[in-house]
Amino acid sequence: MSLWTDLTPSKRCDWIDQLRGWAVIVMIEVHVVNVWLHPGLRPDWLNYLNGLVAPSFTMAAGYSLVISTFRTDGTLRPFWPDTARRLGFILLCAYALHAPGITAADWTVLNTVQKARELFKIDVLQCIVYSLLILQLLARLVRNPRVFTWLALAIAVLVPLVSPHMWAHGVADGTWLPIRGLFNGNTDRGVSSLFPLFPWIAFPAFGAFLGGLYRHLRVEPVEGKARMSESKFLASLAVLGAVLLAWGTARQQPWLWGGQWLQENGVWMLHSPTGAFTYGELGAIANTTLPSVAGRVGYILLGGSLMGAIELVRPKWNGPNPIKAASAESLLLYMLHLNMIFSVLLAPAVIALTGWGWGSLGWTGTLLLTALIIGLNLWAGVAWQKVRQTPERMRWLQQKAVAVLGVWFVVGGWWTFRHFLQSPELAKEPYRFLNAARIRKGLPPTPDGLSRDPEEYFREAERRRMHLSADARADLSRQILARRESR
């Protein structure tokens, strides 16, 4: 029997595992490049490729929801306790990443009003959880996998149609901050949502549609056989991806910019198939339209079908598979690499030692650092997969980790407080103690405690032997001088 005609029902969807695993790996690259590579060195194609990571990640989440929610006989698996606890834990991790910190110092002396508001920024994990909760509710209302599949497709199409209007100036401004970011990414009270449900729920919804199709064609048996072979499904996926990519690419510009400019009450607005928007709004909604979403989904399906085909025909080897480990432990690797980058390597004390500040590296340094962080994270994923094989050891390690976090909450962060207490000139956040620290050093107070004099910053940086490139010094000078205009 050939791969093209093999109708053995699927027990595991390899292509979505590959897509999720590679999405996690490229996500690490995204964050390393965005932090350390000098902005002028970043090509446009890399920005677009990196922009496909979050859609891939969220689409895979919607895809898996269908497989894990509906049994092969069409009945629903219970939401409580396993699914509810898993989503609750992911949501806890999501908000922990945007909390003022995980130490008592972060929540007290190192806290600011703006850092407290950042707790409610909607990032990719919040987007995934809220999208999955909506789709879970829909599945339990209709209680039919086929009906659910087509309703998920309707959501994936309708949401990008209305999303540009949700991003119009002033929409949802002043709404209760914990839910404000679900509507759009416009800045309100200093907080900008990164992944609002409009349009981002379209990706998990489309993933749920594909998951429903896969369940019907490859998982649900008919007289012991699947309705379609894995090879034919992957080929169909590639064809669908090509169609969506072609349509999205061809329609994106005229969909958004095709129309007529008319002046209304002194304001010029473009009346297009998308609606009527100002020039400023058009820039914000460029990635929210249906063609934009379709184009990105097309690229993802082409890449996912290729990954699935390679996985289908490649020789299988013994031993751990780091890509599948990254897929299975995606939350672990997501949390781990973010904390490695933002809590460890970007800590002021570490930057003072290494000189690795924002945008401070060229391609060689960035690639080496990317490889190192990816390697460490893949090792952690494979190691944790082995730990899972012995539940007693896993629970013991989890308990120890909770204990370590408890100790860290008490003792962590105070050296950062001490660092800025001794060097208030270097602070980039308006901590409440900064002016008192400035007065102790004989420096004049400022409205928010932050330095307004670049030379003041550089003197202290030199005293602490901080390595600053010419570009870093220029960027810092611009940032510090800009504070004079925000008095």
Image (spheres, helix red, strand yellow):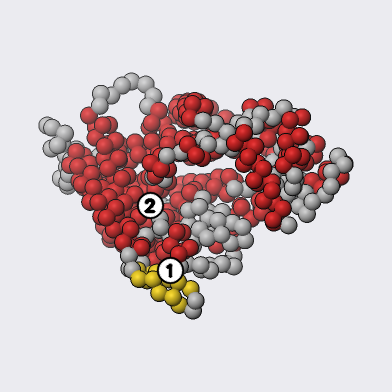
Query: Could you say where residue 355 lies in the image, as x and y percent from the top left?
Result: 63, 29
- Seen in the picture, residue 270 relative to 248 is either above or below; the reply is below
Count residues near mark 1 (Cα–Cα under 10 Å), then give few for <14, some for 14-19, many for 20+. Answer: many
Residue at image mark 2: 204
Q: Earlier in the sequence, mark 1 or mark 2?
A: 2
Q: Along the line of sight, which residue is nearer the eye, 357 or 459?
A: 459
Amino acid at pointer 1: Phe
Per the image, label 1 sits on a secondary structure element best described as strand
Label annotation for residue 252: none
Disc 1, disc 2: CB below 8 Å?
A: no
Q: Residue at x 68, y 37 (%)?
A: 406
* Residue 348 seen from this side: yes
Q: Specify few, some or many for label 2: CA neighbours under 10 Å numbering under 14, 14-19, or 20 or more.
A: many
- Residue 133 lies in what quarter of the image? bottom left
Which residue is painted at 21% across and 39% down in the image? Answer: 230
400 and 435: which is toward the camera: 435
How far across and how far down the image is residue 236, in percent?
20, 46
Residue 45 falls in image quadrant? top left
Q: Amino acid at mark 2?
A: Pro
Residue 126 appears left or right of 224 = right
Q: Residue 392: x percent and y percent?
A: 52, 29
Residue 278 lies left or right of residue 155; in this view the side is: right
The answer to which quarter of the image holds residue 462 is: top right
Q: Secondary structure at mark 2?
A: helix
Quadrant assignment for the C terminus: bottom right
Residue drawn at point x = 22 percent, y = 41 percent: 234
Viewer-nearest of discs 1 and 2:
1
Q: Point out residue 33 in the picture as x, y percentages from the top left corner.
A: 49, 36
**Image height check: is 28 above or below 214?**
above
Task: Tell me, yes or no, if residue 76 can be seen here.
Answer: no
Q: Which residue is mark 1?
A: 277
Tell me if 227 is positioned left or right of 179 in this view. Answer: left
